[in-house]
Image (cartoon, rainbow, N blue to C red):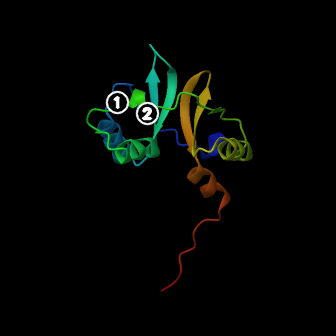
């Protein structure tokens, strides 16, 4: 199975000046654990995850004044839609992260998470009769 079969194609994209509260609200509303941060004037494509927001709040920083650019991972490993799920899982395990931005032609076309991979590898849940 390939990354394109497992990835979410609805990609939450934010700018570097979004506050962490704004980013968290958008991630919560979309029920996603990461946002792609597009900074055309700076670092290019990065990722902000729920863990980044949690770490900032845990340090006592205000989610109303902290901006995405200060917490964005810019040293990103990107996946291709044609990667196998094994390749994606290996990259995540090796890099110690849970999300990969999927690029096609240099543009973000999806995000694949550990949860997406598990859903593909695990058998469908069976409903237990009452």
Q: Quick check: 13 left or right of 129?
A: left
User: In the depicted view, which residue is nearer to us: 119 or 114?
Assistant: 114
Which element is circle 2 on?
Answer: loop
Q: Position of residue 120 (x, y in %)?
A: 64, 55
User: In the depicted view, which residue is nearer to us: 107 or 99?
Assistant: 99
Residues packed near mark 2 inside 10 Å, few (<14), some (14 to 19) or many (20 plus): some
Q: Where is residue 22 in the image (x, y as percent from the top left)?
A: 30, 37
Please say if 36 is above or below 50. Answer: above
Q: Residue furthest left?
A: 64
Q: Position of residue 15 (x, y in %)?
A: 38, 25
> In whole angstroms, how far apart are the C-alphas of marks 1 and 2?
7 Å
Give the labeled residue for mark 2: 71
Residue visible at 63% across and 40% down in the picture: 4
Q: Position of residue 80 (x, y in %)?
A: 66, 32
Residue visible at 60% across and 57% down in the picture: 119
Q: Residue furthest bottom?
A: 130
Residues packed near mark 1 inside 10 Å, few (<14), some (14 to 19) or many (20 plus): some
User: In the depicted view, which residue is nearer to us: 107 or 42?
Assistant: 42
Please say if 60 is above or below 70. Answer: below
Q: Quick check: 113 left or right of 82?
A: left
Give the labeled residue for mark 1: 67
**Contact, mark 1 vs mark 2 (Cβ under 8 Å):** yes
Please say if 39 is above or below 84. Answer: above
């Amino acid at each position: 199975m390939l990354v394109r079969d497992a990835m979410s194609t609805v990609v939450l994209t934010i700018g570097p000046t979004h506050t962490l509260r704004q980013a968290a609200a958008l991630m919560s509303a979309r029920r996603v654990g990461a946002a792609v941060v597009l900074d055309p004037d700076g670092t290019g494509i990065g990722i902000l995850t729920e863990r980044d927001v949690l770490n900032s709040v845990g340090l006592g920083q205000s989610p109303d004044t902290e901006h995405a650019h200060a917490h964005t991972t810019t040293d990103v490993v990107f996946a291709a839609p044609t990667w196998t799920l094994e390749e994606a899982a290996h990259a995540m395990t090796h890099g110690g992260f849970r999300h990969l931005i999927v690029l096609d032609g240099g543009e973000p076309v999806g995000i694949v998470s550990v949860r997406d991979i598990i859903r593909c590898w695990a058998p469908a849940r069976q409903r237990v009769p009452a």
